[in-house]
Image (cartoon, rainbow, N blue to C red):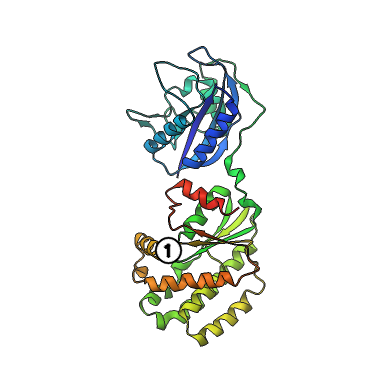
Amino acid sequence: MHTIYLSLGSNQGNTYEHLNKAILLLFQKVGQVIKISPVYQSPAMGFNGPDFHNCTVCIKTYLSAAKLLKRILHIEKTMGRVREGVGYQSRPIDIDILLYDDEVIKTATLTVPHPRMLERAFVLKPLVDIVGDKTDPAFAKAYTTLLEECPDKSTITKQPKWLKNPKDSIALGTHNYIAIEGNIGAGKTSLAQMISEEFNAKLILERFKDNPFLPKFYKEPDRYAFPLEMSFLADRYQQLLDDIGQYDLFKDFMIADYDRYKSLIFAQVTLQEEEYVLYKRLHEMMYREMPQPDLYVYLYQNTERLLENIKKRGRSYEKDISADYLEKINQGYLDFIKAQHQLNVKIIDVSELDFVKNREDYLAVLEQFQ
């Protein structure tokens, strides 16, 4: 992801409402809102008009610089900004790209760092509030020094009212432990990683890549089903025991891309009846005292999409997975969920969504967590 810093300003209408709406749209269409500076009031520069309210926002995004610019211009237009004539004028919202990682960008439409930011105290002061002693990539000076050297001596006044971070309205932190489940290729690991990064959660990922029986199982399922499921049972148990038992003071909650019942669901599909009875008995003994998630999310993907996703990630040992096998796994999950009365379960159909590439799809999935 790219770390970007944007300057926001408004001097028309309800300026706080405009700034909050702009931040919400940036959150929805650009990326994670990491930090928001205090708001500063400053006089209009270069023209006669009402005072501005300005702030700086730090965001993490997957967008390229060119796509970021297009997205920002669209947000400005959506909020009613009209670019016409020559020179400065009052506007409901103004969004400028100050920094894009540590890159120096010069194209016909975009220059980063912003070419006039060093001349504007109302840009540098809120930037310093959230970057501290960070060094400017183009001038090799700390922003605190650049603020001291700024020729703009206009009076800028820090405001007592703060802007809202839209992330705070998504109350994932009300859960202590979230488990995301789904079929092979449903996107559970991607979603768990994205949530962990944005919402400061302890991430628990299944260590399936280290299992020596997995490639063998896909080639000879009858021969390797039992050793595969037994190795998964032992590994998942040990990992959950370690990760759940180690409380992290610096994380708000835990999120895992698998749940303890996964072992039973897959084992019921892959094992013979006698093997499964033994396996289930061992599972019950091992997990008797293990905490359960207070939110269990099942990502449903149709079989066609699952096969596409499996093909895209290109794991050689998964190339022979059949549609029939995936459908059996999905049915196993649904049968398990129907029988659960003690779990808080959310089934989310993501067949028509791409929550990795489309942030709006990602946020739509998170809304269903509430």
Neighbor class of circle 1 (other Cα within 10 Å; few <14, some 14-19, many 20+) is some
Query: Is residue 243 rendered to the left or right of residue 74?
Result: right
For residue 330, above or below residue 127 = below
Residue occupying the point 48% across, 29% down? 95
For residue 338, above or below residue 89 = below
Query: Is residue 240 rendered to the left or right of residue 223?
Result: right
Label 1 element class: loop
Residue occupying the point 43% across, 71% down? 327
Amino acid residing under circle 1: Asn
Q: Quadrant of residue 303?
A: bottom left
Give the residue at the far left of this rendering.
108
Q: Quadrant of residue 10?
A: top right
Give the residue at the far bottom of this rendering.
274
Q: Is residue 45 visible?
A: yes
Residue occupying the point 60% across, 72% down? 339
Give the residue at the far top of this rendering.
48
For residue 159, above or below residue 244 = above
Residue occupying the point 54% across, 73% down? 335
The residue that mark 1 highlights is 302
In this rendered view, identify the residue nearer to me: 307 or 279. Answer: 307
In this rendered view, identify the residue nearer to me: 294 or 342. Answer: 342
Residue 369, horizontal then vertical, whole percent: 58, 54
Residue 120, horizontal then vertical, whole percent: 50, 20
In this rendered view, identify the residue nearer to me: 267 or 204. Answer: 267
In the picture, the quarter occupied by the N terminus is top left
Q: Is residue 235 visible?
A: no
Residue 166, horizontal then vertical, whole percent: 58, 41
Residue 155, horizontal then vertical, whole percent: 59, 16
In this rendered view, identify the residue nearer to me: 285 or 127. Answer: 285
